[in-house]
Image (cartoon, rainbow, N blue to C red):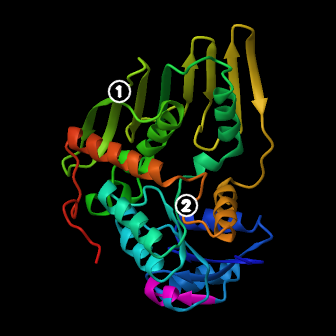
Amino acid sequence: MGIDRVRWGIVATGNISTSFTKDLGVLDDAVVTAIASRSQDSADRFGEQFGIEHRFDDYRRLIESGTVDVLYIGTPHPQHYGIARAALQAGIAVLCEKPVTLTARQARDLIAVANEHKTLFAEAMWMRTNPVVQAMFADLAKGTIGAPMQALADFGFHRPKFAPRLLDRELGGGILMDGGIYPMTFAYMALGRPEEIKAVGSLNEDGVDLSVAMAWRYASGAVAGLTCGLRSHHPFNASVSGPDGSLLLPGGFHHPEYYIRQTVSGEERVDVPMHGAGYHYEAAEVMRSLRAGEVECPALPHAATIEILELLDETRRQIGVSYPGDDEYLGG
């Protein structure tokens, strides 16, 4: 596909969309041509901030406008499915924030629609495209610490006042979907899909998960221990260990600045060149795949999106978290 500058459309004007749009400015071959929000005022403010020409108060109008090649979706989780499906059916590529849907069944449907319409679809798991994370997993693949046998990761924070959506069950609130997906993705990248998972959680009176702990077991004998929560501020560390040492992503492992290699020979800090906030790396991967005419971005694989959502489905089942519409099939 001969595209000189890829035209991006942004859906939603919140913090994540703002950060992503700022980072697109790092890429010379990307241009934001359209923004959609629930209100025209919000779309206009966002458009003024970033110099975006086309501004809409409804994502459908953006999709029908013919002004974009790829859509970035930064809305709350429950809205991802319908917007992504409409864009894919219109032949517009999609990069959708994680988790792309609330259930694995919905994700499988989106991927089927993407394949049917031969249109690129990817989950915006920016951790996967981070150069430090990629370098650490390349180190692991080289056998630096031997066969990985343990993964540990935590993601949690506490604030006097949370963003309302985090505690709103109607919006897929809770820590598991918003933050727990990061430790789960790290363990999945390190060890693959587990043979068995066990989960416990602490829920508030509205059925929203505030703290979750997960244990994963593998046929190889490997194990993973993962936590996430809204009741305490975690160190945000992640590590994978084997018989010959450990590889550690310290403090903010989902967008790290370096990693630490610990072996019998000693400890070494490994720095990897980076620039921007980190969102442009996933955007660049999407644009590369778009130009290649691919339906799937190799750095953001469909199989991982589905399997992690299957693990999220099972974890929610075990801790007793449900969302309105869990049993609904929205496709048509």
Give, as a three-letter code, the residue at label 2: Glu
Q: From this viewpoint, is residue 58 visible?
A: no
Q: Position of residue 12 (x, y in %)?
A: 50, 73
Residue closer to the observer: 277 or 2: 2
Say which element carries label 1: strand
Q: Name the residue under label 1.
A: 215
Report if residue 203 lies within the magenta region. no
* Residue drawn at (57%, 81%) of the image: 35
Say which element carries label 2: loop
Q: Which mark is residue 50?
A: none
Span colored in magenta: 54-63
Quarter holding residue 280: bottom right
Report if residue 61 lies within the magenta region. yes
Q: Name the residue under label 2.
A: 296
From the viewer's perspective, tell me whether residue 230 is left or right of residue 150: left
Q: Position of residue 9 (x, y in %)?
A: 59, 78
Q: Where is residue 25 in the image (x, y as percent from the top left)?
A: 75, 68
Q: Quadrant of the N terminus?
A: bottom right
